[in-house]
Amino acid sequence: MTAATEYTLAELCIVACAEAFRDDGEKLATGIGVVPRLAASLAMKTFNPDMMMTDSEAFMLSEPNPLGDRGADFVQKNESWMGFSRIFDNVWGRKRHAMLGPTQIDRFGQTNTSALGGTYEQPKVMMLGARGFPGNSISHRNSFFVPSHNTRVFIEGECDYVSSIGYNPARLPKGHSLEDVDIHRIVTDLCVMDFGGPDHQLRVLSLHPGVTAEQVKENTGFELCMPENLPTTAAPTVEQLEIIAGLDPHNQRAYQIKDNPPGNRG
């Protein structure tokens, strides 16, 4: 396939996020947000056709739905019914991979989707809430997309409110070990990372075109595992951009990263 020469940062991140689903096989993919959903859809339409995806209501799809208004003539390709009981079978059976965007991430990989500042009883800012994230985070694979990599997200201390499990022995549920935690990929507007460093330290896997290791370090509130001679995140191919455009005909992806600059900032 031919690498594209012009692409946006959002499109680069969509392709990088799609790679997180490459080796999943038959797992239920849940992309929460525009970029994660397009990433899961791209993976399903290209290198992981075994991936399972729902219409976000009650049906399993054989073809991912495009984003936004699909027109009166659109008919989604339903494959089977996927009610809550079947969803939970996949969750508890570790047959699900969710990708979402937390507000805070700490050095353990614990995340915060609930509240900022103050006390638990009186936080300064209330957000979505932990919802099902505590159980999901210990039951199956999770990945994160962060549209703005900075020290307000990758914080110095522990999350203000711990919404999900990470590689922190002090917070492991009874009967579980660190081996049960599966934080697979973190894609940001600067780089791709995982928790594969020593003692589950956050590790940089690739730098986006034009981004330096120093930029990533300066925008992270804790020490990173930064290998030498890091590769550059792969550019989208022409074919991938065509598929993304078909999945996002109203160009919602252009509004997911501030100003959505070119993907190559060199």
Image: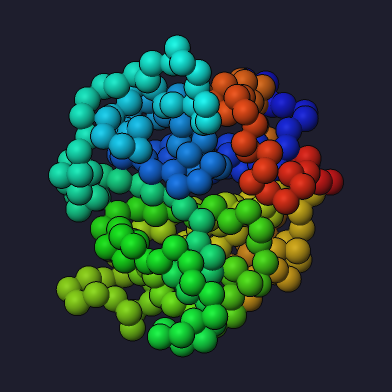
Q: Is residue 115 above or below residue 254?
A: below
Q: Is residue 262 above or below residue 102?
A: above
Question: Residue 224 in the image: x percent, y percent?
Answer: 60, 70
Q: Is residue 171 left or right of residue 144?
A: left
Which quarter shows the N terminus?
Answer: top right
Please indicate, yes or no, whether residue 166 appears anywhere in the rendered image. no
Residue 90 occupies which quadrant of the picture?
A: top left
Residue 147 occupies which quadrant of the picture?
A: bottom right
Q: Is residue 109 left or right of residue 147?
A: left
Q: Residue furthest front?
A: 72
Q: Is residue 142 above or below residue 109?
A: above
Q: Residue furthest right?
A: 266
Closest to the observer, 62 or 75: 75
Residue drawn 40% across the image and 66% down it = 129
Please indicate, yes or no, whether residue 15 appears anywhere in the rendered image. yes
Residue drawn 77% across the image and 47% down it = 259
